Image (tube, rainbow, N blue to C red):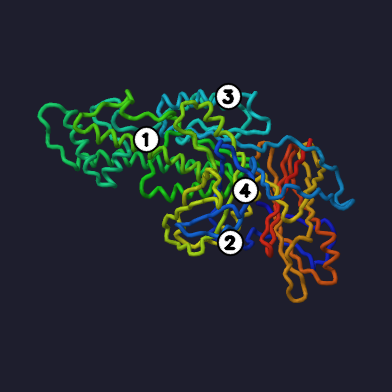
Amino acid sequence: MAWCAGLAWGQDTAEVSTKETAATFSAHVNIVTVPVVVRDRNSNPVSTLKKEDFLVFDNGKPQAIGRFTVEKNGVSARAPNPPAVTPPPDGAIPGEAAEKAPAIPDRFLAFIFDDLHLEFADLAQARKAVLPYLDPKNAGANTRIALFTTSGQNIVDFTNDLDKLRDDLNRIIPRHREFGSRGANCPPYISAYVADQILNKNNQSAIQAIITEEYACLGGPPPAIQPQQIEAEAQQVLSSSEMETHTTLGVLRNIVRRMSGMPGQRIAVLVSPGYLITTGFETELTEVINLAVRQNVVVNTLDARGLYTDATLDASRATYLSSVANTMQAFDRDDQLITGEVLGEIADGTGGTWFHNNNDLGEGFRRTTEAPEVYYVIAYSPGDLKNDGKFHKIKVALKDGKGFTIQARRGYYAPTKKTDEADQAKEDIESALFSRDEIHTIPVSVHTQFFKTTDTAAKLAVITHIDLAHLRLRKSEGRNSDDLVVVSALFDSNGNFVTANQETLQLRLKDEHLEARLKSGVTLKSDFDVKPGAYLVRLVVRDTEGQEIASTNGSVEIP
């Protein structure tokens, strides 16, 4: 970011001063954030619960809830009646007032097709079912849609060009590697799940079943097949599977990071049959979920396999020898359940919806293209958290359950090193900046004015007024002190970040001037060199003493 800003009116720099600074305000560390969706007996969202209605347990130990908010359709319910906008002082900025509010996208929808794991038939059905959401009659004017794949092929970034999205959607094909064929007995098919059982679980029954299948495949007098040969085949399968899992998680992480720069409601829909999370990938999965939670990205998941079918009834699969049928069919059933369960973990962990065991993929996309109507965000700081990388199980309950069902993240992995406070602080302020939530714990308002310098260039002034009456000032050496980090940012008509200015406002107010300063507040001006066009203006203010974040939005269109 390029930092620049100035005061809109003269001030006593001994009491009020500004300086360019980075976002290094103090922040709590080791905060665990838990999105929670509560539904009644009829699956309707429950929106009336309060902080005191919830209980949170970390590895069975009750935790004190620190932060608590109610989110409705991506808009914070913390301040239902925001204060009126306060205009800047008369004559503060010469030039043309920018009062026209352009249509700025505030909803970003990413479809992620897991072509590394999808079978062709499932992918074809999913492509057909998603088409209505790429129709101009259904896509809202303020919505931008992106198309991603886990292979990195046929990607379309956020756009309102629906023709381009449909064209690239039809080009998506399965791109996974498979050793052996599911529909053939020779060579016997080894799934990633069975390979994991052989190599990581030392499951001797799996090894013997595959050896028996190998004998039948080769025919004639059975050669001496050694377990080491089966383990070598399994290693090929598992290595390929783990590479695809690593790629998939990396793509999800990058998509969440991409969406963190979108100013509004952020929904990702992962279309997948699920995949195997082996030992060593649990932490990587948790990191993706943590990132999505921090960046307010809801990841809904859709199991493209549809209605669960027992593997023994699937005609596309090979039949097993009667001597090993029970063993191999049990592996197939476990494979289907465990690989699908990762989709539930991702959705639960980010406050999303997991659509599965249902053939109506059209209904699935209807549910997964919407953010939860209402959800709660609970945050707590584990008092005895050690940097040992161990898994911590989270349980969220209600003091009075009332027959409600609760959907919440299932756990997290402890860090392996101490969290850096400066990095955590930066993440906090960036999370607020790349949101559309308006939070008025500190009353702030934003106003814009511009004048064009040429046909292709303009000067834009963002004027911020801050009400100081609500600050928790610290009394020290005869002064009333606080530091405010003020960030103003611009986003273009597609929701892409353009630029931002930041400064720190230092308050050192004398007692005799305090009342007047609190009454008048402070007005700042931040200047931008821009091209004509429509812009969203995002303002974030963070104070050091009270550790409160305030945010508000504005918009301007420069012809």
* Neighbours of disc 3 within 10 Å: few (<14), some (14-19), many (20+): some
Report if residue 409 is visible in the image. yes
**Going from the N terminus, do you reach mark 4 or mark 3 first?**
4
The numbered mark at residue 111 is none
Residues at marks 4 and 3, CA–CA distance in whole angstroms? 35 Å
Q: Earlier in the sequence, mark 4 or mark 1?
A: 4
Of residues 39 and 248, which is closer to you in this image?
Answer: 39
Residue at numbered disc 2: 28
Residue of label 4: 49
Provide the secondary structure element on which disc 3 rests. Answer: helix
Q: Which label lies toward us, 4 or 1?
A: 4
Work out which residue is located at the far bottom of the displayed protein and give it: 477
Task: Report the amino acid beneath label 4.
Answer: Leu
Residue ID for mark 3 = 132
Find residue 322 and report its image quarter: top left
When the figure is inspected, residue 84 is found, relative to residue 417, above or below; the finding is above
Residue type at mark 3? Pro
C-alpha gap between disc 2 and disc 3: 44 Å
For residue 67, above or below residue 383: above
Residue drawn at point x = 79 percent, y = 35 percent: 559
Of helix, strand and loop, which one carries label 4?
Answer: loop
Residue 331: image quadrant is: top left
**Mark seen at residue 336:** 1
Horizontal side of 232 relative to 440 (left or right) equals: left
Residue 106 appears left or right of 520: left
**Labelled pair 2, 1 in contact (Cβ < 8 Å):** no
Q: Position of residue 269 (x, y in %)?
A: 53, 35
What kind of residue is marked 2? Answer: His
